[in-house]
């Protein structure tokens, strides 16, 4: 059995979905930092001897989370 106000119900549902995608999703993504860091000792052994541009061993790596 179809609801009496099918068009109104559908319009309201689409409006709320739009509001969630337009406002709530970007706010939720913005709560977390875009960049992360990891200690060199927590990576694979082949990365332990990497050096920075000054010739010193790296202590941590910075990466973009891709949000």
Image: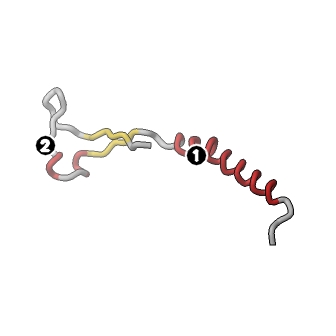
Which residue shows up at 86% across the image and 63% down it?
Answer: 4
Determine whether, in the image, residue 28 is placed left or right of residue 52. right
Looking at the rendered structure, the number of numbered marks drawn on it comes to 2
Residue nearer the viewer, 40 or 9: 9
- Residue density around tag 1, few if under 14, some if 14–19, many if 20 or more, within 10 Å: few
Q: Position of residue 50 (x, y in %)?
A: 15, 40
Model colouring: secondary structure
Which residue shows up at 80% across the image and 60% down it?
Answer: 6
For label 2, the residue is 49
Q: Position of residue 34 (x, y in %)?
A: 43, 39
For label 1, the residue is 25
Which residue shows up at 16% across the image and 26% down it?
Answer: 54
Q: Residues under labels 2 and 1: Cα distance? A: 40 Å
In the rendered structure, which disc, 2 or 1, sits on the residue that comes first in sequence? 1
Determine whether, in the image, residue 32 is placed left or right of residue 52. right
Quarter of the figure with residue 56:
top left
List the single residue furthest toward the right: 4
Residue nearer the viewer, 54 or 15: 15
- Quadrant of the drawing holding the C terminus: top left
- Quadrant of the drawing holding the N terminus: bottom right
Q: Position of residue 52 (x, y in %)?
A: 18, 32
Which residue shows up at 23% across the image and 51% down it?
Answer: 43
Which is more foreground, mark 2 or mark 1? Answer: 1
């Amino acid at each position: 059995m179809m609801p009496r106000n099918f068009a109104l119900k559908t319009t309201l549902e689409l409006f709320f979905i739009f509001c969630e995608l337009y406002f709530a999703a970007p706010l939720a993504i913005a709560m977390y930092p875009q960049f992360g860091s990891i200690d060199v000792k927590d990576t694979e052994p082949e990365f332990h001897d990497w050096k920075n541009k000054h010739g010193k061993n790296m202590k941590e790596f910075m990466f973009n989370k891709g949000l």
